[in-house]
Structures are given as structure tokens and as C-alpha cells.
Image (spheres, rainbow, N blue to C red):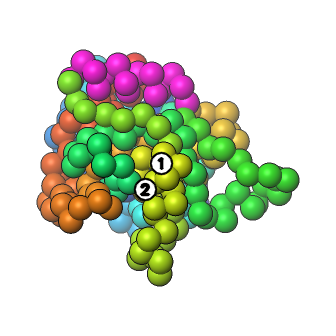
């Protein structure tokens, strides 16, 4: 057991899919995994391990925000011999060519968080994905003919921004969109010599009023799930 996960060593696969929402983790495990087994439910953070096409795969929720995913990613890598975490979440689009349900494959992540201050670096750390995972996700996106965009995202600590126009500066630098977790995942993976990737489904756009419903965010993201599972299969 680690501080926040009650599973035993060996309960997790080498590759873990990590949605933010515990109910999305439950949906994904029950929909796509064979013989899913609940291995954690501490603080309502559900985790399951089962099989996908004969390979052991795990699914675990991260909760919301950089502090939450920072805890769970660290403990999975350190205490449970996890080698790769694939975040599967939602993001808001900053670019007009990105449509609802299009995928953002986060090649890198910027942040407005203070997360990296703990390392005492004399500069700004660029958090990037593991290229083998990214390459696999691109391949499977093409095979499934799913619209996708590869590039840089923003992982923000702020959901309700006091300055509603602040996103425009990030968009001007080509940032695809915004989530609240990926930067910490990439930084922790780099520190611990592990693999990480964020596959994000576009849930809304900052250039329109269109957005996915709560139900679609929770369980209507089949294409993202399939691409993440196929990518996990390549590394399981």
C-alpha cells in the first residue's frame, strides 16, 4: 500500500489509463476490459485491473487538478512498478480548427502552476510526452480515422479565470487548448524515468458556446478510449 492507494503490489498493470473522473474509470473498465477487478476505492478514486485483448491493463481515476494527479502518478510509478500512464481526459480548445470530440495529443504541456518550484530549477522546465507513446497514439488515431491534433497544451490551475481573455495570449503562441493535469504527469514521469502521454478529447471551445454534455464527458468518449487502449496494448 502507498499513502493514498490501498492496492497490493502486483494489482496494477505496467500501463495505466488515467481519466480524471472516477465514474469514467468505472465506465471504461466495465465497457472495454475483460474480467475487471476493483483494486482501489480510497477517497472514491476508483481503480480497476483487467485484460484487453489478452494483455493486463489498469484504469485509475486521477481526480481534478495538478495536485491530485501528482499524488496518484507518483505513487503508481514508485510503489506499484507502473511503467507508463496514459491520461485520457477532456480539454477546452484554443484554436478554431479544433472541433468538439477532436483529439489533442499533447506533445508538450505549459503551465501557470507553481508545481516545478519544488525542483529549484534556475529556469522554466518544458514538460513533454514520451515519444513512443505519442507515436503509437498518432498511428492508432490514423487507423481509426479519428480527427486529431498534435502540439502543445496548457495545464492550468485556474478554471474560473478572473481575466476571461487570458487564454488568448496562450492561443497566440499556438497552444491547442487547456486541461488541468498533464503538466504534472509529464514532469513526474521525467523525474522517475517513466513514460507518460495525455490524450484529450475536446469538450468545449473558447471560440464558441458549444460544449459536450456532462453525460458525453463521462461516457461518450469511445474513440478516445479505443485509441488509448490500443496504445496501452502496444506497451503492456
The C terminus sits in image quarter = top left
Horizontal side of residue 144 vs 197, given as left or right: left
The residue sitting at 37% across, 41% down in the picture is 104
Is residue 51 positioned above or below 86 on the image? Answer: above
Neighbour tally class for label 2: few under 14, some 14-19, many 20 plus, Cα within 10 Å: many
Q: Quadrant of residue 112?
A: bottom right
Residue 171 is one of the magenta-drawn residues: no
Whole-percent x, y for residue 115 in the image: 66, 61
Element type where label 1 sits in the image: loop
Q: Identify the main secondary structure in magenta.
A: helix
The reply to whether the C-beta atoms of the residues labelled 1 and 2 are less than 8 Å apart is yes
Magenta residues (range): 130-144
Q: Quadrant of residue 81?
A: top right
* Residue labelled with disc 1: 175
The residue sitting at 38% across, 27% down in the picture is 137
* Residue labelled with disc 2: 178
Asked if residue 26 shows in the view, the reply is: no
Residue 131 is one of the magenta-drawn residues: yes
The residue sitting at 48% across, 45% down in the picture is 174
Is residue 167 positioned above or below 74 on the image? Answer: below
Neighbour tally class for label 1: few under 14, some 14-19, many 20 plus, Cα within 10 Å: many
- Give the distance between the C-alpha atoms of the residues marked 1 and 2, in whole angstroms: 8 Å
Near-viewer residue (115 or 12): 115
Amino acid at each position: 500500500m502507498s499513502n493514498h492507494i490501498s492496492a497490493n503490489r502486483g494489482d496494477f498493470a505496467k500501463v495505466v489509463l488515467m481519466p480524471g473522473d472516477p465514474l469514467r474509470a468505472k465506465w471504461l473498465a466495465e465497457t472495454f476490459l475483460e474480467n475487471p477487478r476493483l483494486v482501489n476505492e480510497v477517497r472514491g478514486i476508483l481503480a480497476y485491473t483487467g485484460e484487453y485483448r489478452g494483455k493486463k491493463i489498469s484504469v485509475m481515476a486521477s481526480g481534478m487538478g495538478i495536485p491530485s494527479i501528482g499524488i496518484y502518478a507518483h505513487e503508481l510509478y514508485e510503489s506499484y512498478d507502473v511503467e507508463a500512464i496514459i491520461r485520457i481526459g477532456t480539454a477546452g480548445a484554443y484554436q478554431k480548427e479544433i472541433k468538439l470530440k477532436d483529439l489533442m495529443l499533447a506533445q508538450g504541456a505549459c503551465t501557470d502552476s507553481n508545481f516545478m518550484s519544488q525542483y529549484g530549477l534556475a529556469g522554466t522546465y518544458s514538460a513533454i510526452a514520451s515519444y513512443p507513446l505519442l507515436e503509437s497514439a498518432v498511428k492508432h488515431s490514423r487507423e481509426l480515422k479519428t480527427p486529431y491534433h498534435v502540439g502543445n497544451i496548457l495545464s492550468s490551475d485556474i478554471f474560473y479565470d478572473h481575466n476571461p481573455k487570458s487564454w488568448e495570449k496562450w492561443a497566440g503562441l499556438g497552444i491547442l487548448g487547456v486541461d488541468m493535469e498533464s503538466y504534472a504527469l509529464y514532469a513526474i514521469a521525467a523525474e522517475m524515468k517513466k513514460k507518460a502521454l495525455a490524450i484529450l478529447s475536446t469538450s468545449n471551445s473558447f471560440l464558441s458556446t458549444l460544449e459536450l454534455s456532462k453525460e458525453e464527458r463521462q461516457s461518450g468518449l469511445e474513440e478516445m478510449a479505443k485509441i488509448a487502449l490500443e496504445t496501452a496494448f502496444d506497451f503492456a
